[in-house]
Image (tube, rainbow, N blue to C red):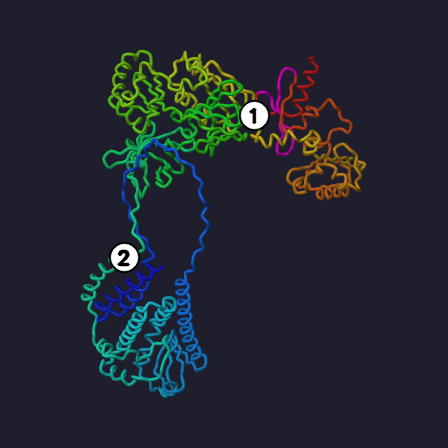
Amino acid sequence: MTAYLIKSILCLLVLWGFYKIALEQTAAHHFKRFYLLGSMVIALTLPLLTFSYTVEVEPQTVIAESAVFEPTVLTETTVATPVEEPTNWLAISLGVLYAAGVLLFGFRFLRNLIRLRRKITNNEKVQAKGHINVLLLGKVIPHSFLRFIFMPKKEFKNNSIAPEVLAHEHAHVAQKHSWDILFIEFLQVVFWFNPLLSFVKKEIALNHEFLADQAALKNENSVENYTHLLFTYSGGAHHTALSSPINYSLTKKRILMLSKTRSVKKLATRLSLFVPVLALCIYFFNQEIVAKPVQKESTSLLGKWVDRKKEFAQFTIYKEGKQLWMKFAKDTFKLEQEGENQYEMVWKNKPLSTTNKKVSLRYNPNNNELFLNEKSFIRPENTYGKLFAGDWEGVDVEQQFFIRSNNGGIGWEIKDQFGTNTYFPVLYDDGFYFTLNNRDVYFKVNGDTMTSSEGHTYKKIKEAPKLIWIIVTKNYIGINAYSISSEKFVAHINEITANWSAENYKNYILDVGTQEGMEAFVKELNTEFKKTQLYRINSSQDLLTQGDAEESSKPVPAENKKIGLSLKILKDGSLLLNGYTLTDLANLESALDAFYKPYSSQERRKKISARIDPYVLTKSKTVEAVQQKLQQYGIAQIKVSPAEIPKPAISNQQQSADKSTDEETQQNRVVEDIHIEIDKTHQVYINNKRADPHHLEQELMEYNSWTTKSEREAMLPVKITVDPVIEMAILTDVKSALREYGVKSLKVVIAGDSQEEALIPAHTPDQNSSVLTPQQKKRNAGTFKIGAYKYYYNKNKQNQFVYYDRFGNELSEKDILELKKKSEKEN
């Protein structure tokens, strides 16, 4: 606070000093008015401002250093007792002194306002054009405040006040000089200790008189007559500090200013001197000037980017000269800058008109994130695939995870009591999930800790080894899915391994896939590989004898292990291949190439094991089409999983709570449907049970008594089957009782109507006609057998059972009953 006050006072001193030296003698009164007011605003705000400028800096490379810890001797330490801080009497005294000054100057300011208000209310007022004349008794000097001009009543009635005087005071009112005075008076109340405010206030008031004199002389009045007129008003009665009297500061300076004219040339010369003065004030009296470091574009925007949601599609931004380019698959785009961190994408070899929609790219340096229109892209090292990659061991469960993330695809090998299995999880907002033991399990990661939706915790025991994946065909050399020339082979591998640690060089995976007939070329390429920094540090592997650095950590030898392929058929008909979404079946072959192109047709038949998981309502024709596509690709080992009824993953706490709940409670917690029938004798039946029409509310409460009325309103629709000959009165009573019970959804069906099936079965139902057993009805989902085939069921939102065959096709209860009868007949 002290620094602010000192800077504010010094800044005002410099600006006021420049005014006294360079501007006070000029006739540019309007400019001087705004300069004086602006000086106070600058002096009050400048010490609060922080100015920053950006500096491009090179990114700092973080080098992991091994820390050496010396043994320490543990000694007993005494706990220090808190020391009571002494009272700062100086601060208290200064605070009291400041408050006293504010009260004193505030009282003076309010007293002057009250005096002027009394003058206005207690004296005669005459409305004039643009102002109000307040007529005072006695001899007073004309003065003004806001829109009021105070003048002696007698002279006003006798029309003896000179027109020049009236013009002078009217100028004060028209130009709103009183607001300037009120502003500086208020500042004096708050900053009463600043002596410069009094000097600035006098300069402002004097400049007001210059402006008013200038307005009074516009009507070709001679300066000599106007000067003589002013002298006639010298002396006079006392006025408040807030008013503007005509005889204010009637000095030689004011008299001389009457004959001066404004010189634009002189004013411009003096204003040119003000620019360096203002610059010095900004430099010396601001709060702080800080340098804001930003990374150079070459280290922030350039490089590889991957789709945040899919972590598969990726592109590269590079620079040629001063031009930015983006490489996406086989297409190259020119990036034309539209604003700060904003670019428009244009095809390199195509005119702009070929694009139907404008594609823009926006870079967010704070989050190191790119937006392609609305799609988000991040750095490969920030993807969930990289964060999850590594070897994990269960803390509270006998389970090991071996997670590898390679070029957008991610595979998990899980070793537990069921053996070792490979999974291809699906990406979601917070991590990955996949179907494990017939239920979806969700995984999240936080540093070296991974948690599952089942409540298990896993610790990372080893980072995943780095992978260099090299593909060599007749027309293609690829390193980690990027096409390169043989001339850039060494440079590209050196670029990949530039930031590797010593552990990365020691344990890495070199995976080489070659096309038949390319052996001689691979030998030549291997000679180039031996020139790389990677081979110089660790010569245990090359293109001809690549090893497996993590072989010991894998549960099965690589040569005997099956290659997994997970293909899910989703509800909307799209496909999910190893966690990568495909819009339709036509894209399946190209997507398979992304994962399995290096494998020969013989390897695909022997090694690749495919698993198809169809959605519960997927048609059998769709499943057969998918199987056919996989077979055409050369995959022979295909397993189609039964369409499972989707069930949410439940935590350990929920499982233990479910186990502790007995069968009786479970049965009571099942929502029981309400069926009502009214026959021609006006007899009412509730779920085939005869009910008293006069006590329907009490009888309805026997059903679903554990639910609240609002719950029943939300989830319990009811149909009423009525005989065509019943009277409306009985139906009205039943409806009223149902609404009291808590039924909002209500439908009345006429018995025998061909458009509607009767909701209520016969009063003496055949017990063998039910599809499900009483035990099965207690569950929300499950399976049952008819003959040699298995069928599935679950409850929908209307609390009704829905049935499916083994291919996920939905069946009606009538279909199931017919199948059951047919099976029983055959047996």
Say which element carries label 1: loop
Residue designated by label 1: 616
> Where is residue 613 shown, x and y percent of the image?
52, 22
Q: Which residue is denoted by mark 2 in the rendering?
A: 282
**Residue 788 is a magenta residue:** yes
> Could one spot residue 154 in this view of the protein?
yes
Q: Give the left or right position of residue 352, taking residue 692 as reference.
A: left
Q: Secondary structure at mark 2?
A: helix
Asked if residue 599 lies left or right of residue 823, the reply is left
Q: Nearer the viewer, residue 269 or 389?
A: 389
The answer to whether residue 582 of the structure is visible from this angle is no
617 sits to left or right of 328: right
Query: Residue visible at 60% across and 21% down?
Result: 805
Which quarter of the figure has residue 538? top left
Q: Residue at x 50, y 26 (%)?
A: 394
Circle 2: residue type: Ile
Quadrant of the image occupied by residue 616: top right
**Residue type at tag 1:** Val
**Sequence-wise first label, 1 or 2:** 2
Around disc 2, counting alpha carbons within 10 Å, would you say few (fewer than 14), some (14 to 19), or many (20 or more)? many
Q: Is residue 752 magenta?
A: no
Magenta extent: 787-806
Quadrant in the picture for the N terminus: bottom left
- Quadrant containing the C terminus in the rendered view: top right
Q: Nearer the viewer, residue 186 or 764?
A: 186
Picture coordinates of residue 110, whole percent (x, y): 42, 73
